[in-house]
């Protein structure tokens, strides 16, 4: 029997709900001539006869031809559930979810099966994570008091409850630097002095706002014709505005004149020096009930410092899988090439000082070479 003739007759038998004839016709198609659609139809014919083992075999044949076929994966997961092979079903469902089409093109008939796939995969991940945590609990108790956040995150990633966050710099990816969301304070002995200067910085911020309110401009300002992506809500909006002391490596003299003690303090710190790109230092104001969407920064050769200056209420910040609340008098250092986002949950604007510093894991020679490389890059771009 030819593949084309058997397929057409088999599909006609499916329409007539003659499951036995459909299975006989479709299974007779030579393997070299059978398509993914043929095997999906054959699996349906077997399922309707409650022959689940044969349905799995048909779906496996379809997946040999197209290992990432969404419908075959979704169907196989459902059949494995019917066979009480729950863990296998969860693994197949996980793969189906990974290749699922976006909601706007997903057929309505598959909405519920996909939701089921997500629920089963999630339930399996949660059960695995709970089992792993229970398995290490006695040993973990022996290390009580130590920082085990990184281990806890690894459990969630391994179980499938969390995604791994990596560095995604938009400009420069320097190799062999670790992806650390928030760096250990011990690497930055000057943080205590910065935090102690909070009242001075607050006073100069207030003076700058009074004297140069016009210099607090929208941080996101794409020109016409440039895709705004996730920044549509904040593009040219004062809901997130900034007052720059340094911008892309250029000292803003009029702004620095308004904030001399802040400027002197920043100049004493290991700010990054990448001509045309860094340092950048600014007061950043986020309006009430406003969020900054997930994004990544330009280069992992630098790290970013945040110091809160005005916190009228709760405000949060996430880097990778780690979310922290801001607290007055507490600065942190993070890698902005790891996906991060911010929320001002309060009813008033929130203001922080932001500036970039060299990654402390770079040697003096590497810093000098990076600066020279960026200068060369600027020269290259300037030549028509």
Image (spheres, helix red, strand yellow):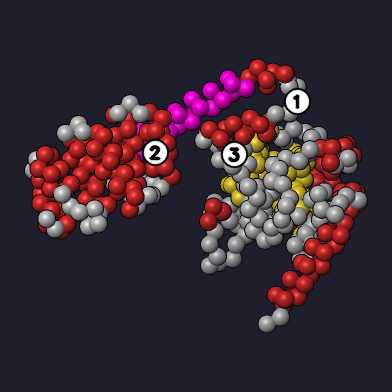
Within-10-Å neighbours for mark 1: few <14, some 14–19, many 20+: few
- x and y percent of residue 151 in the render? 66, 31
**Which of the 4 quarters of the picture holds residue 18?**
top left
Pick the quarter of the image with the C terminus. Answer: bottom right
Q: Which residue is mark 3?
A: 289
- x and y percent of residue 28 in the render? 15, 49
Nearest to N terminus: mark 2 or mark 3: 2
Residue at 80% x, 46% y is 205
Residue at 59% x, 21% y is 135
Image side of residue 10 versus residue 73, left or right: left
Depth order, front residue of 108/217 = 108
Per the image, label 2 sits on a secondary structure element best described as helix
Start-end of magenta stretch: 112-136
Pick the quarter of the image with the N terminus. Answer: bottom left
Nearest to N terminus: mark 2 or mark 1: 2
Per the image, label 1 sits on a secondary structure element best described as loop
Question: Which label belongs to residue 92?
Answer: 2
Depth order, front residue of 73/55 = 55
Within-10-Å neighbours for mark 2: few <14, some 14–19, many 20+: many
| 333 versus 50 height, above or below | below
Q: CA distance from mark 2 to mark 3?
A: 40 Å
Q: Which residue is mark 1?
A: 146
Nearest to N terminus: mark 3 or mark 1: 1
| 378 versus 302 height, above or below | below
Image side of residue 96 versus residue 155, left or right: left
Residue 126 counted in the magenta span: yes
Within-10-Å neighbours for mark 3: few <14, some 14–19, many 20+: some
Task: Tell which residue pokes out farthest to the bottom in this image.
Answer: 384
- x and y percent of residue 69 in the render? 34, 49
């Amino acid at each position: 029997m030819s593949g084309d003739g058997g397929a057409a007759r088999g599909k006609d038998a499916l329409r007539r709900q003659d499951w036995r004839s459909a299975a006989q016709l479709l299974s007779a198609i030579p393997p070299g001539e059978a398509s993914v659609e043929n095997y999906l139809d054959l699996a349906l014919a077997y399922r309707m006869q409650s022959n689940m083992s044969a349905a799995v075999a048909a779906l496996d044949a379809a997946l040999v031809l197209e290992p990432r076929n969404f419908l075959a994966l979704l169907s196989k997961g459902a059949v494995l559930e019917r066979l009480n092979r729950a863990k296998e079903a969860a693994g197949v469902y996980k793969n189906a979810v990974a290749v699922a089409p976006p909601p706007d093109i997903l057929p309505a008939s598959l909405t519920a099966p996909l939701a089921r796939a997500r629920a089963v995969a999630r339930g399996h991940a949660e059960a695995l994570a709970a089992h792993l945590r229970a398995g290490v609990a006695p040993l973990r108790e022996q290390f009580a008091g130590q920082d085990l956040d990184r281990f806890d995150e690894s459990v969630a990633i391994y179980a499938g409850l969390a995604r791994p966050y990596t560095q995604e710099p938009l400009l420069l990816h320097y190799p062999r630097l670790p992806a650390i969301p928030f760096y250990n304070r011990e690497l930055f002995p000057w943080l205590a002095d910065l935090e102690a200067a909070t009242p001075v910085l607050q006073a100069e911020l207030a003076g700058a706002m009074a004297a140069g309110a016009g210099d607090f401009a929208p941080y996101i300002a794409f020109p016409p014709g440039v895709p705004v992506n996730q920044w549509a809500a904040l593009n040219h909006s004062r809901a997130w505005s900034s007052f720059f002391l340094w911008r892309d490596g250029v000292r803003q003299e009029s702004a620095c004149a308004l904030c001399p003690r802040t400027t002197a303090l920043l100049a004493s710190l290991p700010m990054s020096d990448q001509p045309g790109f860094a340092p950048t230092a600014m007061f950043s104001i986020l309006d009430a009930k406003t969020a900054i969407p997930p994004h990544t920064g330009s280069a992992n050769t630098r790290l970013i410092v945040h110091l809160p200056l005005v916190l009228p209420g709760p405000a949060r910040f996430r880097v990778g899988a780690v979310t922290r609340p801001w607290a007055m008098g507490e600065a942190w250092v993070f890698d902005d090439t790891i996906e991060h986002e911010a929320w001002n949950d309060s009813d008033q604007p929130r203001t922080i000082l932001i500036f970039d510093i060299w990654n402390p894991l770079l040697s003096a020679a590497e810093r000098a070479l990076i600066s020279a490389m960026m200068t060369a890059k600027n020269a290259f771009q300037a030549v028509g």
